[in-house]
Amino acid sequence: MHTRGRRLKLTAVLALTVLTLTGFSTGRHHSSSRHGHGSGGGGCSSSSQDHDTSTSSGGTTGGSTHRSRPTYRSTPTATSSATARPLKDGTAVLKRCASVDDPYTTVEVRNPNGREALFTVKVAYKDSIGSTLADTTSQVSVPANGKATLRMAAASTGALDRLDHCEVDPRATVDR
């Protein structure tokens, strides 16, 4: 008979532990002013339980204090693309103009944004009196807050013999 009593006591303690850990209660609750409910029935979905705090509910059962489970709230993560800030245009600087010997123009593009972006760069090829011989546009991907060098083919190799200088649009437009 003594062994049976120990088993019952152990079973009762285990059941109470399981109920306590899962949020069920034995019916003793503190009055929650936030919900406006008094003490009442138990169960996980009981609206009279306050699961938002980890303070003692004041009731004791079998010498142990029942505590509400802490609420785990999600932490903010990186913003989604729908709420992300719009990308800003970059800057373009002419490094080397095309010539008959090397029909490529070199442009450095800078990205002021905190993420990688694709930029469009425009170069105008001018003669000695400032008339435009040809225009070229090209795209380049630039890392976040970084720079990239773009080598652009001249639009018209026939105009290179009359080419005096290149003018790059200082605004590298971001492709949205």
Image (cartoon, rainbow, N blue to C red):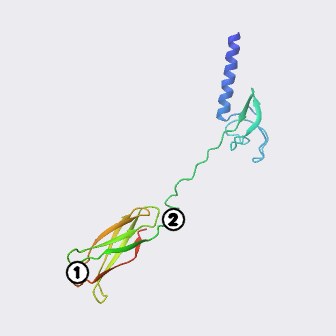
Residue 54 % position (x, y): 69, 40
Indicate which disc residue 48 carries: none
Q: Nearer the viewer, residue 171 or 10?
A: 171
Residue 88 % position (x, y): 46, 69
Instruction: List the residue tagged with mark 1.
Output: 160
Instruction: List the residue tagged with mark 2.
Output: 85
Q: Quadrant of residue 66?
A: top right
Q: Residue at x 20, y 75 (%)?
A: 101
In space, the residues marked 2 and 1 are separated at their CA atoms by: 42 Å
Q: Residue at x 51, y 58 (%)?
A: 80
Would residue 28 be visible to someone looking at this image?
A: no
Secondary structure state at the residue bearing disc 1: helix
Location of the C terminus (image quadrant): bottom left
Residue type at numbered disc 1: Leu
Secondary structure state at the residue bearing disc 2: loop
Q: Is residue 62 above or below residue 136?
A: above
Q: Residue at x 38, y 69 (%)?
A: 109
Within 10 Å of disc 1 (Cα), the crowding (few <14, some 14-19, many 20+) is many
